[in-house]
Image (cartoon, helix red, strand yellow):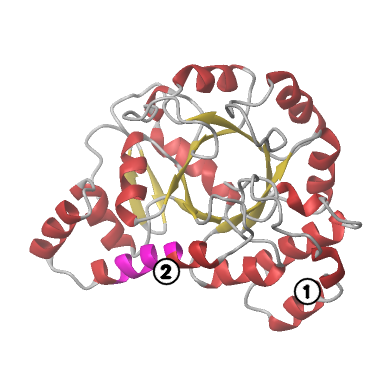
């Protein structure tokens, strides 16, 4: 694929063309995001949780305030984000409200590695998402369909988070449904001719060039994670076997007697998702640690605390 407007980066033998903004090349952000592939991103509320997640092998942490039942959910306290950033060596993700580009500017200025424009927080703008091409760092965005995902990519998202249940019920079924929906649409796309691709792009209301690129690559043109209700090693391995590049884990994993064992079990399941012997080992002895999981429906990641 030719690049008319600048440099490209190779992703699975296909090309992603930079936007015209040479100051913040999109291909560089997509390349940075590939560092997260094959990993688990753990939601943390405290400095201690961030350190534990890093020790357990998380590829990144996402900073979140403790769940609240009342009031508006906003960007986390920058001082907490900076403390965590200083304490860990893995990438740090922080959330901004949808459409709130000033929160994103603040997060970029304090040096976070990724920004999640998150539907878990209150929406700041019902009609407009952040123009992510205006920022130097990669963005994560949620989606439930292929059309959602490609529209977010057009806006500049470098990571797509296929989102399941937002209520915090701990039920993984909606995540499975949405991941299967996206993967099924991509399989259909692979069998279409050029005329059908054009009509399909209009049907899902997605940019034609990105739909055509997804057909060429046989997948989304950016890193794809799953979130919502992923609370066991088996859940994480399921997402990977369905075709995801990684998973988000909610901070409910810390609400047990041995959070390290739970986090490292999920991390190992992501890394060894096709090895049933490893999955047996990391799943053993966790049943007693699952008590109460998913009972607090105020938490976003689907299973207790947050979910991206």
Q: Quadrant of residue 93?
A: top right
Nearer to me, 21 or 40? 40
Magenta-colored segment: predominant secondary structure: helix
Task: Using a 10 Å C-alpha cutoff, classify the residue at mark 2 as few (fewer than 14 neighbours), some (14 to 19) or many (20 or more).
Answer: some
Q: Which mark is residue 180?
A: 2
Q: Decide if residue 167 is on the left or right side of residue 215.
A: right
Circles 1 and 2: CB atoms closer than 8 Å: no
* Image height of 282 relative to 77, above or below: below
Residue 218, position in %: x, y? 34, 65
Instruction: Pick whichever of labels 1 and 2 is earlier in the sequence.
Output: 2
* Image height of 232 relative to 91, above or below: below
Q: Decide if residue 148 is on the left or right side of residue 225.
A: left
Q: CA distance from mark 1 to mark 2?
A: 24 Å
Task: Using a 10 Å C-alpha cutoff, classify the residue at mark 1 as few (fewer than 14 neighbours), some (14 to 19) or many (20 or more).
Answer: some
Q: Residue at x 60, y 25 (%)?
A: 75
| Residue extending furthest toward the front | 70
Q: Find disc 1 in the rendering and name its residue.
A: 283
Q: Look at the image and give the residue range highlighted in magenta.
A: 178-187
């Amino acid at each position: 694929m030719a690049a008319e407007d600048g440099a490209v980066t190779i992703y699975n033998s296909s090309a992603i063309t930079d936007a015209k903004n040479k100051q913040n090349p999109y291909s560089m952000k997509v390349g940075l995001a590939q560092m997260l592939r094959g990993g688990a991103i753990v939601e943390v509320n405290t400095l201690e949780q961030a350190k534990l997640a890093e020790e357990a092998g998380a590829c990144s942490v996402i900073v979140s305030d403790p769940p609240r039942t009342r009031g508006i959910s906003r960007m986390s306290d920058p001082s907490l984000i900076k403390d965590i950033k200083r304490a860990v060596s893995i990438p740090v993700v922080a959330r901004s409200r949808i459409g709130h580009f000033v929160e994103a500017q603040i997060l970029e200025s304090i040096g976070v590695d990724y920004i999640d424009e998150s539907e878990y927080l209150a929406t700041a703008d019902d009609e407009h998402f952040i123009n992510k091409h205006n920022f130097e760092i990669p963005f994560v965005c949620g989606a439930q369909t292929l059309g959602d995902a490609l529209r977010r990519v057009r806006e500049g998202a470098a990571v797509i988070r296929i989102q399941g249940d937002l209520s915090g019920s701990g039920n993984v079924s909606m995540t499975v449904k949405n991941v299967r929906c996206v993967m099924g649409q991509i399989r259909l796309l692979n069998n279409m001719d050029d005329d059908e691709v054009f009509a399909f792009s209009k049907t899902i209301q997605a940019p034609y060039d990105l739909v055509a690129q997804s057909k060429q690559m046989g997948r989304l043109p950016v890193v794809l994670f799953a979130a919502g209700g992923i609370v066991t090693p088996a859940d994480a391995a399921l997402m990977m076997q369905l075709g995801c590049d990684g998973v988000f884990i909610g901070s409910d994993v810390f609400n047990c007697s041995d959070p390290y064992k739970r986090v490292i079990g999920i991390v190992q399941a992501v890394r060894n998702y096709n090895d049933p012997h490893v999955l047996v080992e990391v799943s053993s002895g966790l049943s007693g640690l699952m008590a109460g999981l998913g009972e607090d429906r105020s938490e976003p990641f689907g299973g207790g605390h947050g979910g991206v």
